[in-house]
Amino acid sequence: MRNVELEGKVVRCSTPTFTFRIPNSAFRIGEGRLEEHRISVTRSARYFTLGGGPRGAAEVWFVCHGYGQLAARFLEKFRVLDDGTRYLVAPEALSRFYLEDAAVPAKERKVGATWMTREDRLNDIDDYVRYLDALHAEVLGPMARAAPRVTALGFSQGAATVSRWVALGKARIDRLVLWGGEFPPDLDLTPATVVGRLRAARLSLVYGRSDEFITPKVVAGITERLRQHDIPCRQIPFDGGHELDEEVLRELAM
């Protein structure tokens, strides 16, 4: 069996520079004082692509994986859309970790990635928004005059990721697809610029009718919040669970 980690085309790594803020928080431990600090670092960010290349593509899709997944395996699910008209880009979250405990030898442990955790989450959000903006600029740079349609699709945890990217980033996104994941409840919809960007990105909410995480109650809460801010949302339910569905992908591509 081929190593699916290598089936997507690996392109050069982006190296965004992250700027971190120094919070005012400090903690006292015994007689000493423990203080939290930040420094700016440059690191590599990995992404995978499918398609003949950005030039000449009518559409570019940025697809963000869920918690514990890796970009290459996730991108394999989108081969059904690789028909020569689309360039498919799968960024990988910046924090990778072992999915199995230390009882399994390190070389045999499966690895996944996460866009953020509860720890230092606001800085992690800032980091991945800048990362995705930098990736968008790198991919779309050679096609500045062609202006292909851009879709941002996020699955599970990736749904909140692409929501924040569209709302808080600088990249032009024509369509936003949240698949099996929530619109972030803590995203501030007060600023007019945030609401304007979300209204401009045609938003679709895709979910399986038997998804244990995105229940009818969750869907109702998402749609009501968006409605209160006049953000249109198209619902696309399908018969299935917390998974991607080939038929729905084809429908989205039409």
Image (tube, rainbow, N blue to C red):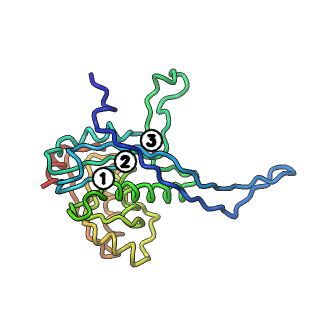
Who comes first in sequence, dot 3 or dot 1? 1
Q: Residues within 10 Å of mark 3 (few under 14, many from 20)?
A: many
Do callouts 2 and 3 mark residues in contact (Cβ within 8 Å)? Answer: no
User: What residue is shown with label 1?
Assistant: 62
* 186 over 115 or under it: above or below: below
* 110 over 64 or under it: above or below: above
Is residue 39 in view?
yes
User: What is the C-alpha distance between the residues marked 3 and 1?
Assistant: 17 Å
Looking at numbered disc 1 in the image, what kind of residue is underneath it?
Answer: Phe
Who comes first in sequence, dot 1 or dot 2? 1
User: What residue is shown with label 3?
Assistant: 113
Task: Tell me: 41 left or right of 187.
Answer: right
Q: How crowded is mark 2: few (under 14 residues within 10 Å), some or many (20 or more)?
A: many
User: What is the C-alpha distance between the residues marked 1 and 2?
Assistant: 7 Å
Q: Residues within 10 Å of mark 1 (few under 14, many from 20)?
A: many
Do callouts 1 and 2 mark residues in contact (Cβ within 8 Å)? Answer: yes
Q: Which of pointers 2 and 3 indicates the residue nearer the eye?
A: 2
Who comes first in sequence, dot 2 or dot 3? 2
